[in-house]
Image (cartoon, coloured by chain):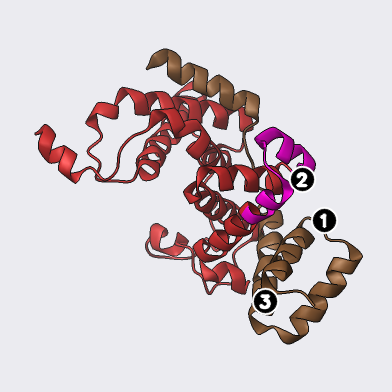
Chain colours: A red, B brown
Amino acid sequence: MVSISNKMTENKLNPDSWVDQYADYLFNYAVARVSDAEIAKDLVQETFLAGLKSAKNFQGAAAERTWLIAILKRKVIDYYRKINSKKGKAEVRITYSNQSDSAGDWLEENVADPFSTLENDEIENEELGQAIQECISKLPKKQSAVFVMKTIRGLSTEDICNELGINPSNLWVMVHRARTSLMGCLNENWFKL
Amino acid sequence: MINCEQASTICNKKQYQEASLLEQIKLSLHLMFCKACSSFSRKNRKLTILCNKADLQILSEQEKIKMKETIERSS
């Protein structure tokens, strides 16, 4: 049994690097769904702990990231169940479309349509945010660190160099690699907008 | 004249408003002749716009350290 799973395991769990690699990605996902940073943070934390607990059941069939996001999805559902039982009514924050007369399968109607120009910006930006975070989480660790510090935290070149112990030309090489990877990773649909 | 590597570095700096005026002039001159860099420059600018639009949220370093500690304690 062990040998089989070892052979198949190209995907391994690395709990030590979870926070660095996936915390932001999971956090963005959660924030988009519960619209509250504090709750989202707790959900991410719970996801990591639940992941640790069930790590021995991890078969390696899915990538680590996919596996963690699956756990987080259930945590979000659990969260809504909990407030549902507390208040006696569900506070569902799924964004329905305004066309209430549409008949047919709800799920199908809500699938993102890359050709639609009717989507409202909020949903689009939410999806965009997740797409970018997913791409960032696929970058090598150092590149993603530099990119996040520069682009999201908006730190100065000097501060980043001091913190990471690199020189500016190193930094720009890493920024360049990160940006090039992101351009390749982000679906080209985003670039057509 | 600058080569493509220098042009891409200036282009990256420009995304963070860190390219000097002289660098920007050199870059625009280069872009007039270099198709590859023009295309890179367009995509790069678009990436900046997308990142701004997405309003990316991240956890602070302290919050991440706290998370790591909690994970370590329970593993």
- B61 and B2: which one is in front? B2
Tell me if residue B63 is in the magenta stretch.
no
Whichever of callouts 1 and 3 sits on the residue coming sooner in the sequence is 1
Q: List the residue tagged with mark 3.
A: B37
Q: Residue furthest right?
A: B21
Residue that appears at 49% across and 26% down: A45
- A55 and B35: which one is in front? B35
Mark 3 belongs to which subunit?
Answer: B
Quadrant in the rendering for residue A37: top right
Residue that appears at 57% across and 27% down: B64
Q: Amino acid at mark 1?
A: Glu
Asked if badge 1 and badge 3 are on a common chain, one would say yes
Residue segment shown in magenta? A154-173
- A117 and B8: which one is in front? B8
**Residue A157: image tag:** 2
Residue B26 position within the rendered picture, expressed as x and y whole percent measured from the top left: 83, 74
Residue A154 position within the rendered picture, expressed as x and y whole percent measured from the top left: 75, 44
Asked if residue A85 is positioned above or below residue A186 in the image, the reply reads above
Q: Main secondary structure of the magenta part?
A: helix
Asked whether residue A127 appears in the rendered view, the answer is yes
SS class of the residue under badge 3? helix
Quarter in which the N terminus of chain A is drawn = top left
SS class of the residue under badge 1? loop
Residue that appears at 72% across and 67% down: B6
Q: List the residue tagged with mark 1.
A: B18
Q: Amino acid at mark 2?
A: Thr
Quadrant in the rendering for residue B46: bottom right
